[in-house]
Amino acid sequence: MDTGAERTYIKNTGKSSFGIGSHVAAVDVKDGKILRIRPLSYDWKYKPEEFRPWKIEARGKTFHVPLKTTVSPLGLGYKKSVYSPNRILYPLKRVDWDPTGAPGSTGPGGRNTQNRGRSGYVRISWDEALDLIVAELRRVIDKYGPYAVFAQGDGHGETKTIHGPHGCQMRLLELLGGYTLQVRNADSWEGWYWGTKHVWGGEPFGLMPHPTNMYPDISRHSDQLLFWGCDPITTTRGFNGGDYVGLFCSFWKEIGIRQIYVCPDLNYGAAVFADKWIPILPNTDAAMQLAIAHYWIEHDLYDKEYVATHTVGFESFSDYVLGKEDGVPKTPQWAAEKTLVPSRIIKALARAWAAQATSCVHGFGGGLIRGPYSHEPARLEAALLAMQGIGRPGQHSFCIINRAVFGSEDHPAYPPSPGSIINNPNLNLRSTYRGYSPFPYAGLPKQFIPKTLVHDAILKGTFTIHGSSLQSSTAEEQFVKYEYPVEGCSPIHMIWSDAPCLMTCWNDSNQIAAAYQHPSIECFIAQHPWLENDCLFADLILPVNTKFEEEDICIDTESVTFEMLYLEHQCIESLGESKSDYEIVCMVAERLGLLEQYTEGKSIQEWIRYGFDTSRVPDTGLIDWETFQEKQYFVVPSDPNWEGYSAGMYDFYRDPEAHPLETPSGKLEFQSLNLTKYFPEDRERPPVPHWVEKSELHDERLSSARASKFPLLCVSNHPRHRVHAQMDDHTWSREIVSCKVKGPDGYLYEPVWLHPSEAAKRGIKDGDICRIFNERGAVLVGARVWERIMPGVAYVDHGARADFIVSGELDRGGAINTISPHSVTSKNCAGMASSGFLVEVAPVDLEALTREYPEAFSRPYSETAGLRFDRVLVEREN
Amino acid sequence: MGKVMVIDIGKCNGCYNCQVACKDEHVDNDWTPIAKPQPDTGHFWMKVTDIVQGTVPKVRVRYMLDTCQHCDEASCIPACRSKAIYKREDGAVIIDPEKCRGAGDCIKACPYGIIYWNDEAKIAQKCTWCAHLLDQGWKEPRCVDACPTGALTFGEESELQDLIAKAEVLKPEAGAKPRVYYIDLPNKYFIAGAVYEPEADECLEGVKVTLIGADGRSRGTLNTDDFGDFWFERQEPGRYSLRVEKDGYLSKTIEPIEALEDINVGDIELHRESAE
C-alpha cells in the first residue's frame, strides 16, 4: 500500500475475466487514491531488445509493434467504476424476504418472491449475511440435495486471477457435494459454434482452424477484406488488446487493401476505414451469401479443382443454391428483395470476390452471428470461402479479436483442439486462477442449465436439448441429448450468482425477471461490485470490491503486442465493507468448517508466489522471483521464429490428406456428415446450409404478419461504450454523443439509431425519447437520427443497465435484450438470438409516463453516472 | 522555439482516449498552480466531436479535436483583468487558478471557444498541456500519451518541422499564432456517387466521371470502380457539377451540387445509346 508518496502499480483494465488480462495499465497512486491510469510502456524497466519488438513488412511498408499498451478509454476511465455512486458498499437484505418463511409464502413473514425486482433493501452486517447464507445453503441442501443450488459464475467481468471474479463459489459448492452449473453459451459467436464447426471443425469455438499469422498473411496477400456483420474496433476496447486492430486497419488502408463492410449500421470501424459500405437488412446475410454462390456457379467463377479435392457435399449444396431442391433459384434478384442490397451490388461483389484474394473479417458480437439461425450465415461464409479455395495465401476467415497477429505452432490464438484459452503452454496461471473456467473442456457436471434456458428451466420446470451449449465443448457433444431436471437431481431452488447480468445481456430477459420471481426459487444470493441488473432480484446482495482494492497476479495473453506476467498490487483500501469474491466465499467456507480445504491452505501472498512459480516464466531463465517483485512485470520476448509458421489453413490447402480438418470427413463439408447423420430432418439447421424464412421457433422477418405491427428489424452489437453489462456508469463515456441521449427529464437514455426517413415517418427528431417495443415488452430509448443506419432498421447496443418502470414489461435503462427473442438459435442449438428481431419505435409522452409511474421516475438518480446505490434502500423496519 | 502539438485528423479513429485521459488527469486531481480540478463532466479540454456526413451508403465519420491552441498572440492574456493568464517559455498558455477572479473575459476573448467556466470553483479553465507533468519530465501531455493511433504528436517545434509543413492552423485570420497544427482538417469534402445501368441491372465500371467547379474548370477525372463508385476526395466547399460519360452510353451531367459538406450524389442511371 502506498504511504503518501506517489507510487506506480500495474493493473490490467480489460474485462475478459477467466484470469486472462489485457489492456495492462500503469496506475499512479497517491494518498490512498488513484491519481491516474495510463498506458504502460513495455520498456519501462526493460530494454526493447530484451523482449524483441516485432514488425511486419508488406508491400513496401512496415508495421511496427507499439511499445506501449493500447489501453482503451474504458480502461483509462476505470476510476469511474471504482468510485461509482452505484458501488455496493455493505451487505443488503431484501426488506420483504423473510428466510424463516415457508417456500412460496407471501405477506408478512413470507419469502415474497413475487416482489423481487420491486422490493427495497435494508443494510445488514456481514455476520448476519453470512449466517443467512450458511443457514439457507444447509437448509436447501438438506431438503433437496446439492443440485438444488444453482451457481451462476461465468462470463466477462473484471479480470482477476486469485479473486475470481466469477465462479469462486463453485469450488466451495463442489466441497458440499455438487451444484447445478449455469452453462455459458457461445454468446458472441453463436453461428461459428453451432454452424461452422460442422464445415471446417475449428474446435472448440468453431472459428476458422489455425488462425496463426493472419495479420502478416493478410497484409502481404489479401487484395480485399470483407468486414461482414461486425465492428472490428469495438469489442477490442473491452479486451483483446485495445486499438491494435485500428492500427492494422490503418496499415491496410496505407498499403491499399480494399476494406468492404457488409452490415446494417455504419459501425465504428466502417465509419473511418470502409472503402465501401454495403448496408444489408439485419440477419438476411444468408440470402446474399446464397446469391453469391449462385452467381459463381452460374458463371463458373469458383475453384472446381479445390472443391473436388478439399470438400465434400458440394453437389447437394449446389442443388439447393440453383433451386433444384426447392424450386427457388437463389439468384441475386431473389436475395435483393430479402436483403435490400441491390442485385447489381451483389453481382459486383461476387465478381470482385472471385477475382481477388479475399478474406472475411469478424470481430465477435456483430449482427451476422447473433440472430435467429445464425449458424446458417456462418456456414455459408465457410462455403463461399471454400468455393474460392480457403487456405490459399490471403484467403481466410479471420476473427480479428483473436491474438494471432503472428503465432507459433504451439502458440496459436486459440487452440486448434479442445484446450484452454488460459492453457497457453508458454505462459499461464491456470492452476492459480480461483474462478471458474470452461477451458479446457473436461466434461459436464451432472446437472446444468444453459444460460439461454434459465427462464424455461424455472418457469416451465423442464427442458430437453441437444448439446449443452458450453463454449468449450466439441461438435460431437452437440448431438448428446439432455433433459432437465436430471433423474435423481432436484430442480433448482436456490441461486448463488456472481455474474448477475442475464437481465441485460441474455435472451428475452423480461422472462428472466418473471423466472426470478418464481416461488420455487426460495433464496437468491448475488455478489457484485455494482447494484445493477439481476442484483435487484436477489434476496441477499453482497458487496464485492474492484481489482484496485486487491493483491493479485495476472497474465496478458490477449494483447497482440506482447505477452506479460505482472503483479497487481493493491492500490487503494476497499470501499465500504466490500470484499473480493474469493474472500466472500472464504468467509462462507470458514463458517462451514471448509476454509482450509477451500483455500488449499494458501494465503493470498502464497497464491501469488505459487502463480509466479507455475507460470512457466521462471522456466525461461530470464527472471527470478526477487527481480520480478522488484520490476512488477515481465514481458515475454516475442517468438523469434514466428515468420516461419504457416498461416491459416495453408497446410490444408497445400495437402488436405496430410492435414485433415476436425470434421468427420477431414475435409470442408458443404453437406455436414454429422448433421446428415443426427438431424437429417432439421429444417432450421439442415445438413446443407439454407435460407430459413421462419420456423416454429422464430418469426422475425419482414415477411412475417408480425411486421405489420413491428416493421423495423433491430440490430444489436457489442456496445461501444461498455463491455457488455459493465461500465455503463462511466460519466466520461455517458457524455459522449454516441453513448447516451439526454432526455428532457435529465435522464440519460440509451440511444436507438434511426435513419432520418424512418424517424420522419414516426414524427421522431434526433434527441427525442422513444419507446422501442414488440409483444415481449418495451424499452425507453433516445433517438439518434443519422445516416449511420440504413432505413428499415433500429439499432440498440446491448448491455445498458435495466431500470424497470414495470418489472419484466417496461424498462427505462435501455436493456434491449429484455425484448429480444425468447427462443434459442434453433431447435437443436441452445444459443441465443439477440439481434435481428422485429420491433417498432414510437415517440413517448414522458410527462404522462411520469404521472403514471411516479415511483419509478423519482428514484435517486445521478444525472451523470445514472443509477445510484441508494435508490433501493429503505429504512430498516422494526 | 517552444513546444507544439500536431493533430492529424486523418489518423484519428474516434477512440476518445484523448478526451478521457484528460479527464482522468484533471478531474478530482488538484494540480495547482497549473490547474485546479476539472468538473467531472461538461468540460472538454481536449474535445472530440463526431462529424457524420454523407448519406447511406456513402457516409463517413470524422473526428474533430478541439483544444487550447496555446497561441503566441493569445487574446485571452490581455483580456484577463486579473492578469492571471501567462505564457510559459515552452509556449504553454496557463490560467493561474489562484489569480483567476472569475470575470470570464478570457472565455469571450478566445477565438476558439475552448475556455470553460468552472461553476463550482468560479474560475475559467482550459487545457494546460499537462504542464505539471512536463515540469516533472514528461515528454507529452496525457492526451498524447494515450493516443494509440499517432494522431496526436507533441514536441519541440524545431523537431516537428516536417509535420508542420503539411499542416495548417485553425482560424489563421484571427492572427493568434496558434501552437497547435492540424493535418487533414475536415474542411474539405468528398463528392461521391455510383453509376449503374438499370436495363442490365449492373454496376458500371470504367465510367469517366469529371468534377467541374463553379468556374467551369475540371477539378479532376476518375474512372468508376467495379461497384460503379467514384469518390472525389477532399474538395474545397463550393458548387460543382459532374459529367458522367462512357463509350456507347448517353452522357449525363449532374448539377448543381452544393458541396458544403460531404456529398453523396446517389445512384446515377446511365443508358446505352442504342436503348433510345
Image: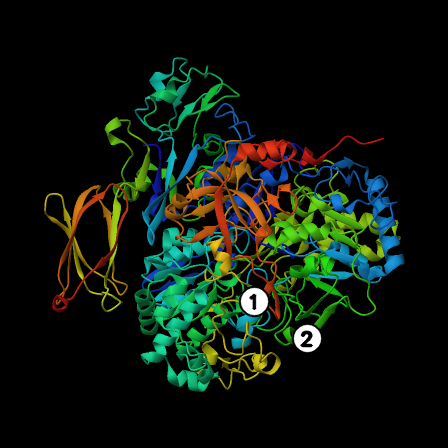
Residue A163 visible: no
Which of the marked residues, 2 or 1, is nearer the chain's N terminus? 1
In the rendered view, tell whether residue B46 sits above or below residue A57.
above
Q: Quadrant of the C terminus of chain B?
A: bottom left
Question: What residue is rendered at 44% in x and 65% in y?
Answer: A285
Where residue A98 sits: x, y (%)? 84, 42
Please, what secondary structure does the residue beneath circle 2 have? loop
In the rendered view, tell whether residue A118 sits above or below residue A369.
above
In the rendered view, tell whether residue B88 sits above or below residue A770.
above
Q: Which residue bears the numbered disc 2?
A: A480
Question: What residue is rendered at 45% in x and 76% in y?
Answer: A650
Residue A300 quadrant: bottom left
Q: Which residue bears the numbered disc 1?
A: A414
**What kind of residue is marked 2?**
Val
Between residue A745 and residue A231, name the one nearer to us. Answer: A745
Q: Quadrant of the N terminus of chain B?
A: top left
Where residue A834 sits: x, y (%)? 55, 57
Identify the image's colour scheme: rainbow, by chain, secondary structure or one colour: rainbow
Between residue B137 and residue A854, name the one nearer to us. Answer: A854
Between residue A332 and residue A460, name the one nearer to us. Answer: A460
